[in-house]
Amino acid sequence: MASTDYRRPGRRSVVLGLSALAVAGCARRPRVVDPPEPEIVPGYGYLADHGYNLPPIPAQFLKPPNRRAEVDFAGSDAPGTIVIDPHAKFLFLVEPDGRAIRYPIAVGREGRGFRFASVVGEKRVWPGWAPTANMLRVEPEVYGPFRGGIPGGLRSPLGARALYLYRGGADSRYRIHGTNDLEAIGNSGTAGCIRLFNHDVIELYDRVPVGTRVRVRSYAESVRLEGEAMANRGVELPARIIPPEELLGPDAA
């Protein structure tokens, strides 16, 4: 009859067995991988401005033509003029020699009524904001909580800069300003007037003196100069105010 060996395993066998278990345990442990660095589009990276730190604009919102660019200018406006095309969703700062700096914009509900010539009558850095009586009347659910206004800073819907447009020597109540609502750029129907990425409105602000002439293109002019497809660029979005912590994190408070 065959005998069975019930001897306890030796110390070496035990050590080897434990080592095998340890290796197997390590193999099952999830590997910690650092998140990839965001793609930084030139001109839209980290920006420190007057004590505020702006993160990069994500590349997904900057697909051409939705980024600042120097382009050939098809219009006949004099250098130094701001030309707003609310249909193609562009703002042009006309330069000499048939060139212009083109900025992508969002056209708010208030901005859609902006069709007249004006001038930059005032400029402000990190301006405060308060809803107009018309905003409160038309969309109380959106603007009612902000009836008392919002001081300048990361929470302000006017963003990092505002150009206040005057007509006949008086404030027209229309503005060119920044925004935290990145999805709005290139589209219409959003809250506000003529809105730019904060990075762009900071760049524009430094180029534009008080007294700069501002003109708005008609739809027919936009079709003629930019083409029918471009003159119908973008979609209509519902009005909303973006809490800065949604974009900048809890430190925005």
Image (cartoon, helix red, strand yellow):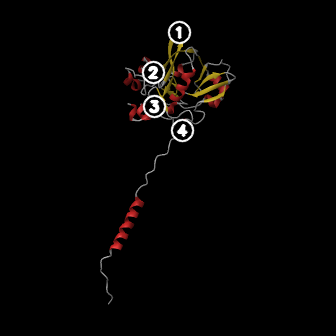
Find residue 144 and report its image quarter. top left
Q: Earlier in the sequence, mark 2 or mark 4?
A: 4
Q: Residue 173, image x and y in percent?
A: 49, 16
Query: Real-space Cα distance between discs 4 and 1?
Result: 42 Å
Q: What SS does tag 3 mark?
A: strand
Which residue is the extreme one toward the right?
Answer: 97
92 left or right of 15? right
- What residue is disc 1 on? 169
Which residue is the extreme one toward the bottom?
Answer: 1
Q: Does the CB distance between marks 2 and 3 fall below 8 Å?
A: no
Q: Earlier in the sequence, mark 2 or mark 3?
A: 3
Indicate the amino acid at tag 1. Gly
Residue at 54% x, 19% y: name it: 114
Mark in the foreground, 1 or 2: 2
Indicate the amino acid at tag 4. Ile
User: For the residue carrying disc 4, how many other residues have a C-alpha within 10 Å: few (<14), some (14-19), or many (20+)?
Assistant: few
- What residue is disc 2 on? 127
Instruction: Name the foreground residue: 56 vs 233.
Output: 56
